[in-house]
Image: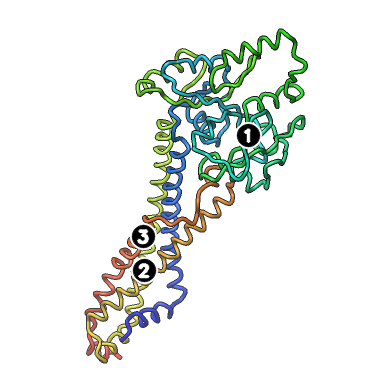
Amino acid sequence: MNLFKLSWKYLTFRPLSTSLNVFLLALGLAIITVLLLIQDQFEKKMNQDAAGIDLVVGAKGSPLQLILAGVYHIDFPTGNIPMDEAQKLSRNRLVKNIIPMALGDNYQGFRIVGTNHDYPALYEASLADDGSLWQKPFEVVLGAEVAERSGFKVGDEFLGSHGISVGSHEHDANNFKVVGVLERKGNVLDRLILTSVESIWYTHDEGGTEPSDSTATHEEHQVLNLQEDVAIKGFPKTTESRELTTLLIQYRNPMAAIQLPRLINSGTSMQAASPSFEMSRLFELLGVGITLLQGLAVVIIGISGLGIFIALYNSLKERKYDLAILRAIGASRGQLLLLIFLEGIMLTFMGAIFGILLGHTFLSVIISQNEQGVVGSLQPWIFLKQELWIVVYALTVGVLASIIPAFAAYQTSIAKQLTKA
């Protein structure tokens, strides 16, 4: 007697009831699948993007906003800071390295970031093909995702738009020229366009053009030469009063983590925020929402388990005569017990597989609607080991829902049922 085949026949005999039970279970499991994928990849990507950055300094405002804008590039900056104040900070004995950043423009939603060569080096980025890093203003290096979506190659030119979101007016005084494309690293650089800080300054100057050395006076040349002699490493050279958006700081020693943020927040017009601290707060806040969604998923799965129990129990009432016939032709009580358990397990196994696929599909749809954010960098078709526990959980629900109907089948009386017939 093939119990698997017999169980399948009983399930397909009522396709509507079976489909509804499978779908209800799959819905709860799909929610859990999506939460698992987002939580795992989101935390990994956020930690990966913040690796090597001990402190972020910017204009006073929300610390979390400062981190999201300066490290992850998914929020609006809190404002600008004076460069001379930033340069003073770089002389502090607690600072190992400072990476200046200037924001303010975009190309089709991809942010144009003015910085220095330490920024791609921070993520150990490498160039594809025969490209190079920028050497002059208005030369840019594209992240892998930007290059893929724009179709730009080395040598191509484009106009940037004002602001950090799509829909702003274009800066048509200067074209940006692509001089390199970064290899895909799966981090924040994939979504950025990197250039020099001067490129951002000159773009927003009146007329949007780079100052010409040919028009500089003798006195200005002397000032420029002096500025080059005393130039602070990592900062662009300028004799004008300029501003930056954020500073990414690396500590020189553990003592800096205690002293430097307090020094900046109380003794300057700037604000310091720790990526690790702010992201811990963010994950804590998100954890409340995730817990609520997990609770909702458990309720849905519990309801689906109850539905499976009711379906099996009602089906058993109608099949008592069939079970008695099976006992009469040689089936043992244990085989009838196993038959009912198999039906519950097969139902929940189908629900588990369908739920996992539904979860991945749902995440894929979410990502397609948020292509340029952090969510857009998630991979919807990566399968985690934790998803195996979803299958185990579903099968457990099937076993529990089948206990009472299976026990009732085990107690089936041949004589009693055949006499009724």
In this rendering, the answer to whether 383 lies above or below 333 is above
Earlier in the chain: of badge 2 and badge 1, it is 1
Q: Is residue 109 left or right of residue 302?
A: right
Image point (38%, 61%), residue name: 303
Q: Which of the two residues, 319 or 294, is positioned nearer the viewer here?
A: 294
In the rendered image, which quarter contains the C terminus? bottom left
Earlier in the chain: of badge 1 and badge 3, it is 1
Check disc 1 and give the amino acid type.
Ile
Q: Are marks 3 and 2 in contact (CB under 8 Å)?
A: no
**Mark 2: few/some/many CA within 10 Å (<14, 14-19, 20+):** many
Q: Are marks 1 and 3 in contact (CB under 8 Å)?
A: no
Image point (61%, 29%), residue name: 114
The image quadrant that residue 399 belongs to is bottom left
**Mark 1: few/some/many CA within 10 Å (<14, 14-19, 20+):** many
Give coordinates of residue 257: x percent, y percent: 38, 23
Residue at numbered disc 3: 388
Check disc 2 and give the amino acid type.
Ile
Give coordinates of residue 10: x percent, y percent: 38, 80
Give coordinates of residue 259: x percent, y percent: 38, 18
Q: Is residue 11 left or right of residue 177?
A: left
Label for residue 332? none
In the rendered image, which quarter contains the N terminus? bottom left
Is disc 2 placed on a helix, strand or loop?
helix
Residue at numbered disc 1: 112
Q: Nearer the viewer, mark 3 or mark 2?
A: 3
Residue closest to the far front: 130
Residue at numbered disc 2: 308
Is disc 3 placed on a helix, strand or loop?
helix
Give coordinates of residue 246: x percent, y percent: 54, 25
